[in-house]
Amino acid sequence: MPTSSSNSWDPSLEHAVLSDVGMRRANNEDAATALLADSAERWRRRGHLFVVADGMGAHAAGEKASRMAVESILHHFLKSTEPQPVDAMRQAVASANAEIHRSGRENPDFMQMGTTASVLALLPGGALVAHVGDSRVYRLRGDQFEQLTFDHSLVWEMQASGQIAEGSPLGDSFPRNVITRSLGPSAEILVDMEGPFPLQEGDVFLLCSDGLTGQVADEEIGILLGSLPPARAVRVLVDLANLRGGPDNITAIVSKITGPTIIGPAPPLTVRREPLSAPLLATTAICGLCSLGFAITQNWPLAVITGVMAAVALGVAFFHQARPPRPRSSQPVANAKRGAAPYRRFTCRPDEAMVKRLCNTVNALRATANEKQWTMQWQRVEQLEADSRRAAENSSWREAVRLEAEAVIETMNQLREQHRRQASDSTVDY
C-alpha cells in the first residue's frame, strides 16, 4: 500500500511513497523515504526531504546498500551544522557513500555493493536535488514534464560525449542498466547538485527508480501525474509497470504543492550596516599621527598635507558607513543555480492516444486471463472503461485518463487476487 500524508503543520503539500518488488524479483533492493518538516523552524532550515535509492549487489548487498543510503542521508542532512542546505546535502550523500564503502570492505559478502541515490529537498528558496546513479527526479509544471537529473549510465555518458546520438540504433543496442556512478564501490564520490528550482503552486515532483522508467514512458508518467492525486499516481505508476512485465523493483515518490503556504513570502531580509572600513581607519590613524609629528617639528607644509589626507580617509570611511544599509537574505539556500537541468523536457497533455495506451494494457491482461482461464471479476473494470469512453466522447481527456488509470489499478488488484488463488505465470508480454 502507498504511504501518503498531508502534512499537519503545512497542509499545502501532499505526498505519497510506494515501493514494490515487481513481478520477477525475489526481494526488493529499492529503498525510499519522505520526511516532512514538522515545524516552521525546521522548514526554514532543512525543508521537506525525499530520498530514493536502488541497490545492487549479491547476497542481499543491494538491499543493505540502499537502506544504508536512505538512513545515512537523512541522518547527516538533518544533523549537519552547515548553514547552507546545498552543502549539507552534498556532504550527507558523500558521508553515506563513505559508510557504504566501509561496510563493503569489512564484510566479504557485501564487497562492491552499491546503490543509486536521488535526493529532493523542498525549501523556502526552491527545490534542491542531489543525485548519483540512474534513479531520477522529475518536475511537472502545467503540461511541461522535466527530468532534473542526468543518468549516470553508459548510454547517457556516451550521448553526452557525442559518441552516439540520442535515439540512434547504436544507442539502443547498449544495455540500459549499466551505470557509471553509484554510492559504495569507491571511497570518494562525485555528487551532482541541481537547483534550486523556484516553487509554484501546482508543481508535482517525482523521484523514482529505473524499474518504473524502464516500463512506463516519460510522456505517460507526466500525463498520469497531472491527472491523479499523489496516492493514486504512485499506485497506477507501479501497477502499470507491473502489468507490462515488472522485471525490476519499482519505487516512486510523488509530492505535490497544493497551496501557497509552502511557498510563502519572500525570504526575510535582515538589515546590517557595514562596519567602518579597517584599511581606511588605519590610513586615517597613520596620516593623523604623521600630521601631529610634523606639527611638533614645525614642518607645517607636510603637517597640512598629512592632516588633509587623514581627514579625507576618515570622511570616506564615514561615507561608506552612512550609506543605506545593505539588505541581506537570511534564506539558507544559495541563490546561484547549480547543474544544467532540465536535461529533458516533454509536453504531456491528456489525449486519445494516452487513453488507448492504458486501455490496451488492460485488454492485454484480459486476453491473457481468458487464455489461461483465470477466474477474475471484470465488472468494476468494465464500468470504469465505460465511464472513460463517455468522458472521451465529450473530449474530457483528463477525466478519461483518470478513469482508465483507475481501471489499470483495478485490473492489477484482480491479478493479485488471482495470484493468491493459484501460482501462475503473471507476465504480460507486449
Image (cartoon, rainbow, N blue to C red):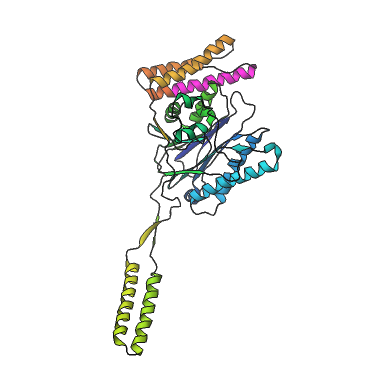
Q: Where's the N terminus, which quadrant?
A: top right
Give the residue displayed 50% in from the left and 31% down from the top. 155
Based on the picture, tell me whether residue 110 belongs to the magenta stretch. no
Q: Is residue 262 visible?
A: no
Left or right side of 185 for 195: left
Give the residue displayed 63% in from the left and 45% down from the top. 99
Location of residue 360 with respect to 225 vertically, above or below: above
Q: Is residue 24 visible?
A: yes
Q: Position of residue 384 (x, y in %)?
A: 46, 18
Q: Position of residue 405 (x, y in %)?
A: 47, 23
**Which image quadrant for residue 55?**
top right
**Which image quadrant for residue 164?**
top left
Location of residue 403 with respect to 55 vertically, above or below: above
Location of residue 281 with respect to 37 vertically, above or below: below
Q: Position of residue 248 (x, y in %)?
A: 57, 27
Residue extent of the magenta highlight: 402-430
Given residues 252 and 293, the one toward you in this image is 293
Location of residue 32 with respect to 188 vertically, above or below: above
Find the residue positioned furthest to the front: 163
Given residues 320 and 252, the one toward you in this image is 320
Q: Position of residue 79 (x, y in %)?
A: 57, 51
Q: How many marks?
A: 0
Given residues 104 and 404, the one toward you in this image is 104
Based on the picture, tell me whether residue 423 belongs to the magenta stretch. yes
The chief SS type of the magenta part is helix
